[in-house]
Image (spheres, helix red, strand yellow):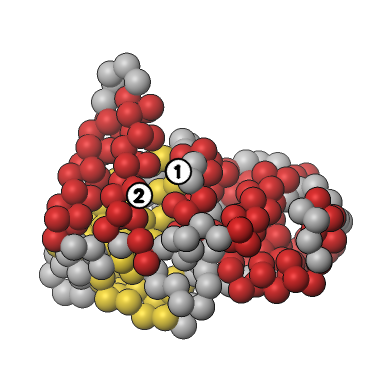
Amino acid sequence: MENRVRRITEPVSIQYLETDEHMQLEEHEHNYHELVYVVQGSARFMVKDRRYTVAPGQVILLGNMESHAVTAFSGKYCRYLLLLEPRCLSSLLEDTRLCAIYNQRPGHFRHRVDLSPSASADVLSLMGSILREQESEKAFAGEARICLVKLLFIRIYQDQPQAFPFPENSLMAKTILQIQQHIDVHFEEEITLKTLAGQKYMDMYHLSRGFKEITGYSFREYLLLKRLSRAKTLLFETNSGISSICQQSGFGNTSNFIRTFRKYVGMTPGRYRRVSRDRPSAPGRPSAPG
């Protein structure tokens, strides 16, 4: 039986899920970052044009804007699912090298991380501890959970630093991450690459090339996807009108918002709201995570 994922209301959420039969999730994305640790069985993940088979002891990391499809093979498929609120990522992990695992997608990046046996055992233990703290009513359980999440990513980094986009913490990578963090917080405001380049004392075209090379997205595409992600969350979680959601998501006018939403999501905002609420799922998308 498939355990459904609940709506996320905190910076960190974790679940242990089991599937007893063949499972197939069509291409979808979530409004949060995701880490899947496979405990039993295996699954195939399609992330854009890349295919990964994830077996026990391996993890796969999916950013909140990355469309992916999942197929679990016959037999029992058990996994831990760690979900992180994108706006809280920098405060959760703090170090830019750790944050880059979700925010930056250079050409050599691989979503699956093949851990050593000792690191895999440590990650499994940490996942269990995070889940216990989530279910605990003890004092500082929330703070303990956040500390354990950071320790988990540190352990993955210690074992496989080459899996992180820029383990050397380069100046350009750090600058791009700072710009991404600015967009994550201020995407509903007027943001231009020219203004940000001026604030960083950088040539706009050099910054544009660096942004695309490091994140895998153009500046305009990244900003647009962030705004669409926010709009989908508001459509799913609130009863606000379309014009209000348009403004809260950073779109200039309602007509442009509806046209852009239909182009990238494949349906109007109103229909998206109806479809997403008709299916039990995680926030902002009518399907369950892998």
Disc 1 and disc 2: Cα gap in Å?
Answer: 8 Å
Q: Say above or below: 57 vs 123.
A: below
- Furthest toward the bottom, the residue is 49
Provide the residue designation for mark 1.
Answer: 93
What residue type is disc 2 on? Phe
The residue drawn where x is 59% and y is 49% is 233
Q: Residues within 10 Å of mark 1 (few under 14, many from 20)?
A: many
* Quadrant (top left, top right, bottom left, bottom right) of the C terminus: bottom left
**Amino acid type, label 1:** Leu
Picture coordinates of residue 141 (x, y %)?
Answer: 32, 25
Please rate how many residues cluster around mark 2, counting C-alpha atoms within 10 Å: few if below 14, some from 14 to 19, many from 20: some
Closer to the N terminus: mark 1 or mark 2? 1
Residue 52 seen from this side: yes
Please, which residue is most extreme toward the top here?
139
Report if the CB atoms under discs 1 and 2 are less than 8 Å apart.
Answer: yes
x, y percent for residue 251: 80, 55
Find residue 61 and name its label. Answer: none
Which sits in the foreground, 262 or 110?
A: 110
Residue at the spot 44% in from the left edge and 60% down from the top edge = 167
Residue at 20 percent of width and 69 percent of height: 55
Please state the horizontal and vertical placement of residue 201, each as a whole percent of the image: 80, 56
Q: Is residue 17 left or right of residue 89?
A: left
Name the residue beneath numbered marker 2: 153
- Where residue 225 appears, as percent x and y from the top left, is 65, 62
